[in-house]
Amino acid sequence: MSALQEIIDVYAGLRAQGHNSKESLQFLRLKIDTLSSQEQTEFVRQVRAWELKRAAERKTGDSRPKIKPLQKPASNDPFQQTEGPETLPITPEQMKEIRRQQPPARRAPTGTHDLGDQQSGWDTFFSHESVLSLTNPETNISLDVHPQRHRHDVVLGRGDESFAPDVDLTVLDAAQHGVSRIHMTMHYDASQSTLSVMDMKSTNGSFINGVQLFPQEIRVLRHGDELRLGRLVLIVHFYFSETR
């Protein structure tokens, strides 16, 4: 899968989670910068086509998540609040403005997390002071992650010369274990004190305790879970910061 297609897939995943187009582009702005001018043009074309297709599905009564139809921008300011259908910021000037802006705080997902999980208990509790430790049992290498310090969903994957995910698993031989560059995202929900993960249509899949996640399926992460990205196994531990 090309870097361009992976970024488009992340955009689609963010929109499915309830983010509007501006928030999605804000989150991806650093990754968009890694694309060539030709790839950025193609990214804009494919995003517009994706949005128009979703708008058409809404008109035909499709039961999947809906978006508002597009309209021509009323001004060159993509952050100006206007009435009526949502405007997709895509002009070169708007893209430059997006890159200069700080990402907004992520709003809570609008979709359901009802995946058979019981009410949050000690094993799902992750506070603002907690630390997530991902340990590979083969090498005993641990990576400490602080998802609550990010203002966007944390990307787990395999870095290379053109792309660096928030959690780079290259040190664990990610390529040899079938980890995609944009394999999974992780979201910290401060209101529920939980972490949730979502597979980003990875080539070799994501698994929790041996159960495969569907593409873009959201699952709450628990202390002690076995998380597998492709063939790379990571054991999940939650710690308080004073103990790490």
Image (spheres, rainbow, N blue to C red):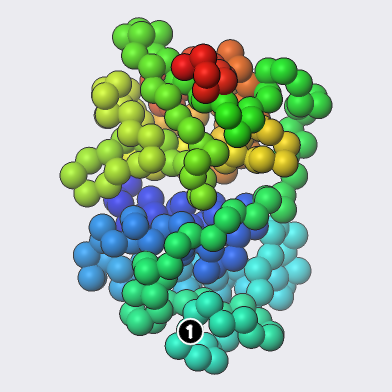
Most distant residue in the front direction: 242
Q: Is 25 rendered above or below residue 169?
A: below
- At label 1, which amino acid type do we have? Asp
Nearer to the camera, 228 or 28: 28
Give the residue displayed 40% in from the left and 79% down from the top: 94
**Number of numbered discs overlaid on the protein picture:** 1
Q: Is 152 rendered above or below residue 52?
A: above
Give the residue displayed 59% in from the left and 39% down from the top: 188
**Residue 169 picture location, percent across and down:** 33, 29
Left or right: 221 in relation to 131? right
Left or right: 192 in relation to 133? right
Most distant residue in the bottom direction: 74
Left or right: 98 in relation to 196? left
Give the residue displayed 49% in from the left and 29% down from the top: 206
**Residue 75 picture location, percent across and down:** 50, 91
Which picture quadrant has residue 41?
bottom left
Nearer to the camera, 93 or 150: 150
Residue denoted by label 1: 77
